[in-house]
Image: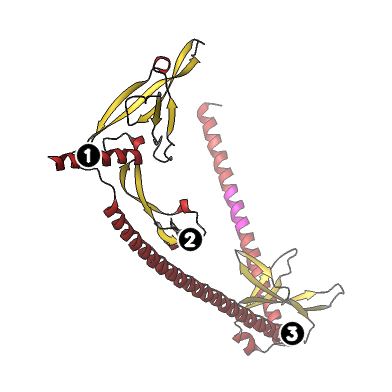
Amino acid sequence: MTQTQHQQVSLHIDTLANQTLARYRQHQQRERQGEEDRMRQQDQQAIAVFKTLLETEVEADLLAALSVTYEAHHEHNDVPQIAAVFSYAGVAWHLSQEWQRQPGEWRWAIRATHHGNGSRSSLYDLSTAASPQALRTTLFLKLGERREQLLREEHEATERERRQQQVEEEAHAMQEREAQKRALRIAQAVREHRYWSEQLAALKQEALQQLWRWPEEIRISLYHVSYCAGIGRGEDDEPVLEHAGGWTGTDHLDEHGYLRLEPAKPSSWSKATAPRTIKLSPTMHLPIWERWTVGSVEELSGELREEVTVSLPGVVARRDEDLGTGFRLTRDEQAYSEDSYQECIGRVPLAWIRTLVDQAAAGEQEGASHV
């Protein structure tokens, strides 16, 4: 067989296969259509029989008022299961025949369902069964129960809404009461702060008038003395001289070798040290005096001046987050004296320096009077 003859045979076989497949599918389609027509007709006949039976129990006008429709279900056999379906009080109702174990015995099945989240579930408190000739009474009994249930749910929803509204109103009223109380506390705190601020301002004004001031053109000399306080050991255990020192108003020892070291403030928050009188040997302690000539408070070393503050006993500055931001002055009988609110009105020399300045000013006035 030539190649041309082989191709012709192959095309003939393809054509026969296609024709046979097409006729087979047409046959299948006709059988399917026939089966569907047969089942549709069977369903219509079964629905007609079921409808006639149902109307012997429930009047046709009532069924029409309920907008009943009929459904046919095929499960395990070809015999359709017919159900009358309608909606009432937010529930889908299904009426069907339920066959008993005894041949020929049956009863009505009433099933109530609701749809939710794409699924359907039965309402067991409404679903029930009814014997023949008792469907109408049982059905309307269940419809009444559903109506009662719906009214109860609506009442409960209304009651929940009322209670929720009552809770919200009480919460709102409480918020208003708290807001009013807070406003009163804020107003009281503001008034108290204003009162103590005025008292403090008056006290500051009085203290400023009495504040010590450095007289103009008065300069004095102060001395910082350092001396050998002993012999210690260095990092390599070698002997080293240890030095100490302090402030004084003179540049020499007295006739007995004594020197008075005056008070000083090591830091701004510490108290001034107490004065000390020490005895030094020029040959042993090797004292060295450093002279400072000053004519104002600003020229003094920080350890030789102090802040002048004013305060009201028992009045403190406190911050209450509930009453708004910022500190406010308030009275607290339980507060310690050091907790009292203070304000600095200026800086003055330590007392011994003020004495030296006053003495210098008095000497200047006395000299001027002699002239």
Kindly indicate the quadrant of the structure image that contains residue 266.
top left
Amino acid type, label 1: Gly
Label annotation for residue 138 = 3
Looking at the image, is 329 positioned above or below residue 58? above
Secondary structure type for disc 2: loop
> Which of 113/347 is in front?
347
Query: Which quarter of the rendered picture does the N terminus lie within?
Result: top right
Q: Which of the marked residues, 1 or 3, is nearer the chain's N terminus?
A: 3
From the image, give the main secondary structure of the stretch colored magenta.
Answer: helix
Q: Which of the marked residues, 2 or 3, is nearer the chain's N terminus?
A: 3
Looking at the image, is 355 positioned above or below residue 221? below
Amino acid type, label 2: Asp
Secondary structure type for disc 1: helix
> Which of 147/257 is in front?
257
Secondary structure type for disc 3: helix
Looking at the image, is 267 positioned above or below residue 47? above
Q: Position of residue 47 (x, y in %)?
A: 67, 77
Query: Which quarter of the rendered picture does the C terminus lie within?
Result: top left
Q: Which residue is mark 1?
A: 363
Decide if residue 297 is in sight here: no
Q: Position of residue 258 (x, y in %)?
A: 41, 26
Q: Residues within 10 Å of mark 2 (few under 14, many from 20)?
A: some
The residues colored magenta run 21-29
Decide if residue 167 is in sight here: yes
Q: Position of residue 332 (x, y in %)?
A: 48, 61
Kindly indicate the quadrant of the structure image that contains residue 290.
top left
Q: CA distance from mark 2 to mark 3?
A: 80 Å
Label annotation for residue 332 = 2
